[in-house]
Image: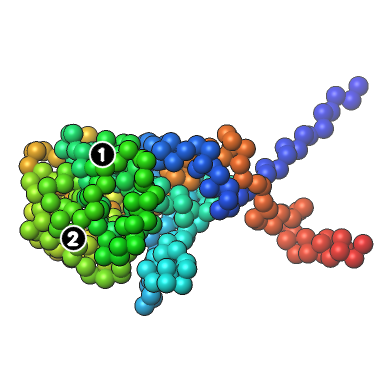
Amino acid sequence: MNTHTPTQTAPAPSLATRFLDADAMRTLVQRIGLPGCIAGVAARIEREFLRWGDYDKSARLACHSRDGVIELMPVADERLFAFKYVNGHPRNTAAGLPTVMAFGVLADVASGAPTLLAELTLATAIRTAAMSALAARTLARPGARTMALIGNGAQSEFQALALRDLLGVRTLRVFDTDTRATDKLVANLAGEGLAIQRSASAADAARDADIVTTCTADKTRATILTPDMLAPGQHLNAVGGDCPGKTELHPEVLRRASVFVEYEPQTRIEGDLQQMPADFPVTELWRVLAGERPGRQRDDEITVFDSVGFALEDLAALAYFDEQAARLGLGQPVDLVLRAEDPKDLFGSLRGAAARLAA
């Protein structure tokens, strides 16, 4: 009797990539709700920061021009690789374009196959706000309820809602040199349970606020906050200084504070920290989250989170939105990568395609 059993060939893994275009990402956020997305991304960022040592990390690759910057931000662990493409062009709004535009990719490290391609402009705003709220929750005084929001552009509403939901901020003091931006913010946040006070200047907004968040867009060495504006016990989220030649804080503000960063090698190049000597002391936030280093140690201490955005935050956001899209059945499969019938015969796939066209 012939007992030979034919060898079973395992089915080849799928190369389909989930594609979340702008409409799908907007629908995904609407289905979950913006507060739920911010909280979900913040939780995922904290989870990944607590696995800091598992990741292969590097500062982002940046191509600078007169008008802005285009960047690639990679990071990987043993299972997932992620990168984000993102730009920063402050003059874009005059031409009807966003200052920031982004998309991102998740890939399977074992095979290199891309599993997700997603629009990330909206997700970047969400993860930036989630990161600010996570930092403030870790570093600000307990009971912080008042926040100065200086810079009322595209990021501002996300910052306000993230600090409202994850920290309990209830009063906003808002200022922008462009009063139309403040008008937009006030209109968008109507009915959101926040007491909004218009301020005549950055100094007026910052005066005695528990938290001061700066999220300005101009690519310049600005001094949005100066030492005379500081109050004992404040926490500062410096969000807008995020590339070489772009700052928001006077150097003396940093000298008077305990300074916390995401990934020190990157922040020393891009953040407000670029103004300081190489030995100026800072603490990476993951160490505070992990209990390795102290955060705020006194009620009157001034703390600064010099936020530039780091690739691990984008991996966390991509993974979160990928899981939620799968749960809700959103996005569509696309053949982002060509697949040949014989993976060793890429040229032959052209002949097969030509034959099908001729038939």
Placement of the C terminus among the 4 image quadrants = bottom right
Q: Residues within 10 Å of mark 2 (few under 14, many from 20)?
A: some
Horizontally, residue 325 falls left or right of residue 220, namely: right
Q: Amino acid at mark 1?
A: Arg
The kind of secondary structure element at disc 2 is: loop
Give 69 or 38, whichever is nearer the viewer: 38
Placement of the N terminus among the 4 image quadrants = top right
Q: Which residue in the rendered view is the most extreme toward the bottom?
A: 66
User: Which numbered dot is residue 170?
Assistant: 1
Using the image, determine if residue 55 lies above or below residue 95.
above
Q: Residues within 10 Å of mark 1 (few under 14, many from 20)?
A: some
| Residue that mark 2 sits on | 201
Give 56 or 251, whichever is nearer the viewer: 251
Horizontally, residue 148 falls left or right of residue 108, namely: left
Identify the residue shown where x is 84% and y is 28%. Answer: 4
Using the image, determine if residue 186 lies above or below residue 40.
below
Q: Is residue 313 visible?
A: no
Horizontally, residue 145 falls left or right of residue 70, namely: left
Give 39 or 276, whichever is nearer the viewer: 39
Q: What percent of the width, then of the height, locates residue 194?
A: 29, 41
Quadrant of residue 134 in the image? top left
Quadrant of residue 299 in the image? top left
Q: What percent of the width, then of the height, locates residue 252?
A: 9, 60
Q: Amino acid at mark 2?
A: Ser
Identify the residue shown where x is 53% and y is 54%. Answer: 119
The kind of secondary structure element at disc 1 is: loop
Q: What percent of the width, then of the height, locates residue 201?
A: 18, 60
Q: Is residue 229 visible?
A: yes
Q: What percent of the width, then of the height, locates residue 31?
A: 53, 38
Report, in whole angstroms, how far the alpha carbon at label 2 lies from the one at label 1. 20 Å
Identify the residue shown where x is 67% and y is 42%. Answer: 13
Count the marks.
Answer: 2
